[in-house]
Structures are given as structure tokens and as C-alpha cells.
Amino acid sequence: MAFEIPKQVYSGAIKTVTIGKGDKAITLGGETSYPFYVFEGVMPNKPRVAMEVWDKNPGEDWAEPALAPFKDVAGDPVAWAQKCVKEFGAEAIALVLVSTDPNGDNASPESAAETAKKVAAAIDVPLIVYGTSNVDKDAEVLPAVAEACADFKLTLGPVQDKNYKKIGAAALGYNHTVIANSPIDVNLAKQLNILLGQLGVKDSQILVDPTTGGLGYGLEYSYSVMERDRMAALTQEDEKLQLPIVNYLGQEVWKVKECKQTNAEAPQLGDQTKRGILMEAITAVDLLLAGADLLVMRHPEAVKMTKSIIQELAG
């Protein structure tokens, strides 16, 4: 009698969300089993990788190895985005409006919207536009971006429980997708998805950002929450958790001391460039195994490594 591998039956499935438009639009989700368990279900849309672009030169905010590949374009978000797409194979661009931080440059919503529009027009892949996670300022900036980029199908985030009405309404009005961000908690993630639904935002317009911890700095909490999210979605048929997950991991990895310390400062840690790239790539793979559908990454070499793993696991 032939041996048969026991298989779990999943009663739920992850819904699909399409970001961007045209030939380079990306469809996320659609899984009917746990991540990469293709022997138990299907994974019609493999996870994708977006690359991070700032609307101002990061300068010393970025570790030298992370900034080095972009030094020639770091002051120009349009050129930076184009380089990520053309040279490094970015499947989407995540434009971070750092200049709007009220504790920093405090740039106006109009200025941010103009920058976003220029970047959107200059690339042919989906554009994600991030605020600074300042609830009040994002509620001003992201609606302005939504209006200015009405001709482009953007993905706007982070949308939080204290500003979801303004950003969600703008996304509805101009046909954009939103990234619902909650602080590493399954119930809070579900509640925000419910609130967006009550506002009128369709499930096909929502991505879930569970908040991401870097390797050694909270990754286990993110992993656990994502795992529980997927279990509830696939085995308990929890419709409000059956949504694709996005992880903004580049910034979380490269801000830690192990990535920022130079070879002279921490010779015992080995080469700074290599350790930073590996920390980002390892974090990415961990998140993929937890259920990530879209990763926002920083270093081109880490992106390359991660995409090769995706190809190997998803086929």
C-alpha cells in the first residue's frame, strides 16, 4: 500500500488585491493553504518585492552600505525610483514621504502630492506611498496625494484607527488601495479592517500591515501575529483576516545598531555590508514563511537574494 502524506483541509482562502494598473499591475493573495504549502493548496500569486525610495536624501539616517547603491540619485526621488526599477528589478516602488514629518522638515501636503505625482508618472510599476505614521499629518498628506494622483492607482499607507476615515474616504473617492496598519495584534488588525469596510472600502482595496520587527528586534512578535492571522483566515474562515499582508521591513532592519556599526566600531561582527544585507534577507525570508505577500525592502543585494528564495519556494 502506497504511503500518502497526510494533508490538512483548509476551509478558507486569502482574497486577492491588485495594486497598480496596466501591464505591470500586481495581484497579491489568492492562497488556499499556509505559505508555500503547495502540496496542500495553491499559491497562484507569488509574493512580490517593492523597493523603498525616500522623497529626500537620507544622509546619515541610513547606514552607509544601504545608501551606497543610491548615492548618485538619493536627492532625486524620480531618478531613484527609476534606478530601482531599471537596474535592480523592483516590482513596485514604496515612496516614503519623510519630508512631511512634523518633527522634521514638515513639508506641505501639496509639496508631497506633487512629488508623488512625478514619481508615479516616471515609473511603470505600482507605486506605494507611505506617510510618516504621524496620525494627524498623514491624514492631511495622503488625501492630497490621492487627489493629485487620481489617474494612477496608488497604494496609500499607513492607515490607522485614528485617521482611517479621512484616508479611507480619499482612497474610495479616487480608486486607490490602502494599507491598514495596526500594532502587532490580530484583533486590532481585524477591527481596523472592519472599520474600513463600514466606511465603504472593499476588501479588494485593503492590504494588512501588522507592523514589522527586524531580526533580533521584535521579529518573533510579528511572525507570531502573522501566523495567527493566517490560521484564522484559512482554518476559521475569518473573512476580515483573509487579506494579503505587506511588511515594511527595510527600515526596521537597517536602523538597528548591528547594521549601523561600521567595521571599525564593531570588527567582531564581521563586514558591515555583508551583515546588513544578510540581516535584511533573513528577515524577509522569515516574513515570507509567516505569510507575507508583499515586502518593502532597501538593499538591492538583499532584494536579489529574497527574490531567488521566492522563486525556489514558489516555483
Image (cartoon, rainbow, N blue to C red):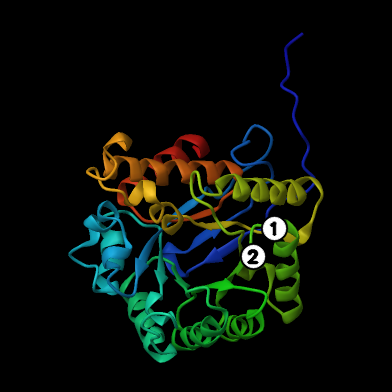
Cα distance, mark 2 to mark 1? 7 Å
Is label 2 in a helix, a strand or a loop? loop
Where residue 69 appears, x then y in whole percent? 23, 56
Q: Secondary structure at mark 1?
A: loop
Would you call the spot at circle 1 few (<14 residues within 10 Å), some (14-19), or many (20 or more)? Answer: some
Picture layout, residue 166 above or below residue 88: below
Q: What's the residue at 52%, 47% (across, down)?
A: 46
Q: Amino acid at mark 1?
A: Asp
- Quick check: 32 above or below 252? above
Q: Position of residue 5 (x, y in %)?
A: 71, 21
207 and 158: which is toward the camera:
158
Q: Which residue is mark 2?
A: 182
Identify the residue at the far left of this view.
72
Name above or below for residue 280 compared with residue 294. Answer: above
Q: Is residue 28 left or right of residue 39?
A: left
- Residue lying at 26% horizontally and 37% vertically, measured from the top left: 267
Q: Nearer the viewer, residue 37 or 60?
A: 60
- Residue 100 is left or right of residue 134, and the answer is left
Q: Is residue 224 visible?
A: yes
Q: Quadrant of the N terminus?
A: top right
Q: What amino acid is labelled 2 in the image?
A: Ser
The relative height of residue 63 versus residue 276 in the rendered view (above or below) is: below
Q: Which residue is mark 1?
A: 185
Q: Residue furthest top?
A: 1
Mark 2 neighbour density, 10 Å: few (under 14) some (14–19) many (20 or more): many
Image marks 2 and 1: residues in contact by CB distance under 8 Å: yes
Left or right, residue 116 beside residue 4: left
Q: Position of residue 77 (x, y in %)?
A: 29, 73
Identity of the residue drawn at 47% across and 55% down: 249
Q: What x and y, as percent, mark residue 75?
A: 23, 73
**Rendering quarter of residue 281:** top left
Closer-to-camera residue (2/256): 256
